Image (tube, grey):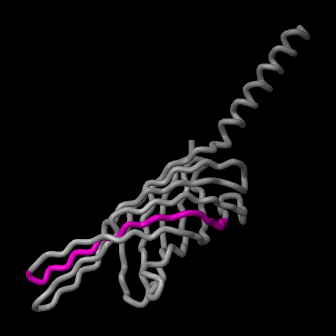
């Protein structure tokens, strides 16, 4: 009888360890919509991104993002028209989170970002060009978990400046996203 109890206890202990390991769910994937703003010229771009990350522990995570521009700025006059937008963007970020409540945490992030901007001007002749910027991205956000697997994020980030050495324009973004952990 004692052997059966010991075997049952070991089986329970092993299954509890398996379930607790599954409950940590370190991998996550998601989608994010960002409204990027270029200051001084009042350009606003919409970017839809895929997100993939790995949560090392309760505090630290690494995250990758790849986004495509879905909203451009357009200008036109009697003689010319212009269109400016984000072609694509990618980031690799480190994130540090601090729990505020059981289902709410705030985080800081920093990493590398590269964004390719497309320009099209039509004044009788069509001119197309592109310009890429890369550098430091940093920001802060909040994550609200609806279930152990599903969460909503909201964040503010500062992206690499657009321009040359003489005329740099500040770029920032406000984002909302959804992540699924597994």
The N terminus - image quarter: top right
Residue numbers of the magenta segment: 106-124
* Picture quarter with the C terminus: top right
* SS majority, magenta: strand
- 90 displayed left or right of 27: left
Locate residue 144, reporting x and y percent: 59, 61
**Based on the displayed image, in which of its 4 quarters is residue 63 positioned?**
bottom right
Q: Position of residue 39 (x, y in %)?
A: 44, 86
**Which residue: 60% across, 62% down?**
143
**Residue drawn at x 49%, y 54% as measured from the top left:** 51
Query: Which residue occupies 72% across, 63% down?
Result: 98
Residue located farthest toward the right when viewing the structure as drawn: 2
Q: Compared with residue 50, is residue 69 higher up or lower down, i.e. above or below?
A: below
**Is 67 contained in the magenta span?**
no
Q: Which quarter of the picture shows residue 95? A: bottom right
Asked if residue 83 lies left or right of residue 142, the reply is: left
Hey, which residue is sitting farthest left in the picture? 124
């Amino acid at each position: 009888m004692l052997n059966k109890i010991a075997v049952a206890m070991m089986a329970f202990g092993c299954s509890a360890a398996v379930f607790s390991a599954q409950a940590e769910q370190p991998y996550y994937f998601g989608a994010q919509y960002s409204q990027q703003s270029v200051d001084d010229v009042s350009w606003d771009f919409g970017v839809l991104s895929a997100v993939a990350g790995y949560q090392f522990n309760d505090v630290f995570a690494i995250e990758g993002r790849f986004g495509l521009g879905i909203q451009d700025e357009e200008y036109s006059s009697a003689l010319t028209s212009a269109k400016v937008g984000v072609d694509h963007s990618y980031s690799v970020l480190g994130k540090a989170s601090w729990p505020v409540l059981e289902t709410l945490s705030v985080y800081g992030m920093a990493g590398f970002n590269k964004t390719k901007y497309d320009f099209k001007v039509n004044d009788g002749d069509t001119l197309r060009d592109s310009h890429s910027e890369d550098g430091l991205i940093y920001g802060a956000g909040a994550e609200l978990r609806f279930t152990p697997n599903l969460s909503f994020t909201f964040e503010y980030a500062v992206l690499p400046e657009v321009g040359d050495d003489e005329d740099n324009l500040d770029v920032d973004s406000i984002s909302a996203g959804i992540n699924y952990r597994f």
